[in-house]
Amino acid sequence: MNYVANALLAAGARPMMTDAGDDAVQAVRAASALLVNLGTLSSDAAAAIPPTVAAALDLGLPWVLDPVGIGRLRARTSLASHLAAAPPSAIRCNGSEALVLAGEGRGGRGPDSDTAAGDAAPAAEGLARRHGCVVAVSGPADVVTDGRRSWQIASGSPLLQRVTGTGCALGALVAACCAVADPFAAAVTAHAWMGSAAELAATEASGPGDFAWRLLNALDAVAPEKVALTATIR
Amino acid sequence: MNYVANALLAAGARPMMTDAGDDAVQAVRAASALLVNLGTLSSDAAAAIPPTVAAALDLGLPWVLDPVGIGRLRARTSLASHLAAAPPSAIRCNGSEALVLAGEGRGGRGPDSDTAAGDAAPAAEGLARRHGCVVAVSGPADVVTDGRRSWQIASGSPLLQRVTGTGCALGALVAACCAVADPFAAAVTAHAWMGSAAELAATEASGPGDFAWRLLNALDAVAPEKVALTATIR
Amino acid sequence: MNYVANALLAAGARPMMTDAGDDAVQAVRAASALLVNLGTLSSDAAAAIPPTVAAALDLGLPWVLDPVGIGRLRARTSLASHLAAAPPSAIRCNGSEALVLAGEGRGGRGPDSDTAAGDAAPAAEGLARRHGCVVAVSGPADVVTDGRRSWQIASGSPLLQRVTGTGCALGALVAACCAVADPFAAAVTAHAWMGSAAELAATEASGPGDFAWRLLNALDAVAPEKVALTATIR
């Protein structure tokens, strides 16, 4: 939560986070977009998510689902399937999580993916068509699809896998971009932004320790409207 | 919690943190001061706070209330009003939160303030007189008042708003200073310490990413007994 | 949790963390080793630990107990005593915590130790013999014992005490090493690895703020098979 909040602040957004029941339903009324992240899901948070999503839908807010670690963990897998059908404006996940949501896989080992984003692209496209939402699958080459169009963003750095919370920060960035753009453009922009920032940070980093804070500096320094041009039609 | 703990360690204090019921009541017996921070309030923590405050009062410990995000969030707003009447040795808040506690506002947008500290100064002075406690309101120019005296501390950096947890770290620093000084001197010193450290960190930082850790270095490097002299009578 | 995850990633391990009930039991099936850390123990986590340990034992997984802050806090002290008898493959603790587990002390002040590792060595050796497990006690000179052999690792830096989570990261590193070595070799290696990394980070750090991320870089840079040779027979 701390790194995600700092990434949003670096990107110019205003985070407000909670894992407590009533708070979330009330906080969403002041929000421009909602992110539901299933990582380290407490029982408080699990109970708070469905009414919070209902409140966001009532308000017409865009919202993004990040189904962290589904597959092995039954409670969050079943919650994620339920939420995907709401549907969200966008789903942000890795290859293994996309396969689980599409009913084609059993999940990765913990929060990591055992499936490349490209290999999960057909499943992601089917998922996007079924739910009528954008699906973004992260990996060395990210795929963003709405079921009709599929774009690929090939920027990034292997150091992203060496710092916890970078995937969650990307999901939060998709949600922040959804506040000011349609979900497809938002997801492409967020992935290109994070990828370009990671490349910039990696050129200066000595290891994973300074890559983490250099990535925050780079999210602040990189102009999102420029990097979105680096995405290509898949 | 992580950044606050590191700020306290950098400042030379010894943090002990919990959000679990019985732990807090027992831990307070080993403490020199208590901080009650209402941010990301779990149901565990909400239930644990009143008996923990009662234990601190029994022990004659100074304690500080940081009513993060009150206004929109009903549960913590009502808890904060109840706690303010205990009363604490000091309340550390932003302008919007001061207005809510004084019954004059509906709160900011999430953890941020929509009200300058100076604009909230009359409300803070009334609040300090009503409860007989120190009230410190953070902003570009901080205000610290006990209802009779009001001091202003104008140091700081806009980068403080770009790193999550810096406001919470300031509340914790007020509590740590309350362990060794009266609450008014403690609050003035803590705000001057954080403000001077932020100015030092900002001169070296390339962005919000390295500002965060440079601020910890600066809390370690700055001598609090010197910076308190930078406060002025408002 | 964030710093511990980043330390494991820097060391080349793959962390998966949760404090939610059923998640932990299911997640352990994908794991190579289990760490049970009692710091900031929520009621969710406290309930989840015994069945998670039972699941790890069923699977024949190595597991490590880090009894953070026991002594003053009754719930976690009683849980730690119960867990120590399971027994774990290794217990990672500080001097005060070792004395509490051995029935000889009342605990330190919060997460800090009031007892040097060397002074707690006889208690640690008795504890290791009683439970048939490895006991590692951290301090300026760490002690690792299985009740027959006691090794000492004298590397490290005082800056380790100025950054929260470094002790927890060491416990996690012991668990990660237990996935690929016997518990005694794992504990010696993890302590030598962390100690050497801390020395390397301290030579470059300006203060506690950059020591934290330089330590992650150093965990990545230091080769564990070399540093284990720095341990000596006590």
Image (cartoon, coloured by chain):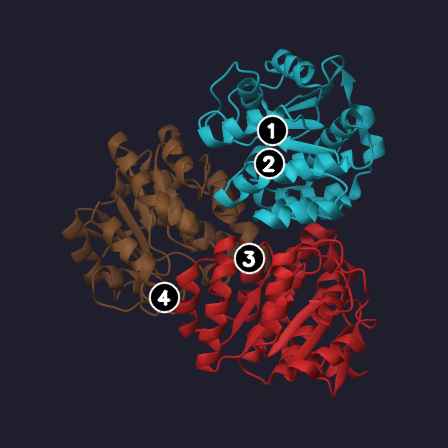
Chain colours: A brown, B cyan, C red
Q: Nearer the viewer, residue C171 or A98?
A: C171
Residue ID at (53%, 57%):
A203
| B44 up-or-down from A28: above or below | below
Numbered tag placed on residue C85 in the rendering: none
* Residue with the mark numbered 2: B50
Look at label 4 and name its amino acid: Ser
* Residue with the mark numbered 4: A113
Look at label 3 and name its amino acid: Met
* Residue with the mark numbered 3: C1
Numbered tag placed on residue B83 in the rendering: 1
* Crowding at mark 3 (Cα within 10 Å: few <14, some 14-19, many 20+): some
Labels 1 & 2 near each other (Cβ < 8 A): yes
Expressed as whole percent of the image width and height from the top left, the position of residue A179 reads 33, 34
- Seen in the image, is B54 located left or right of residue A39? right
Q: Secondary structure at mark 4?
A: loop
Which dot, 4 or 2, sits closer to the camera?
Answer: 2
Q: Gap between marks 3 and 2, in whole Å?
A: 27 Å
* Crowding at mark 4 (Cα within 10 Å: few <14, some 14-19, many 20+): some
Residue C17 visible in the shown view = no
Q: Gap between marks 1 and 2, in whole Å?
A: 8 Å
* Crowding at mark 1 (Cα within 10 Å: few <14, some 14-19, many 20+): some
Expressed as whole percent of the image width and height from the top left, the position of residue A35 reads 36, 43
Q: Nearer the viewer, residue B45 or B232?
A: B45
Q: Chain of mark 4?
A: A
Residue ID at (62%, 64%):
C78
Q: Chain of mark 3?
A: C
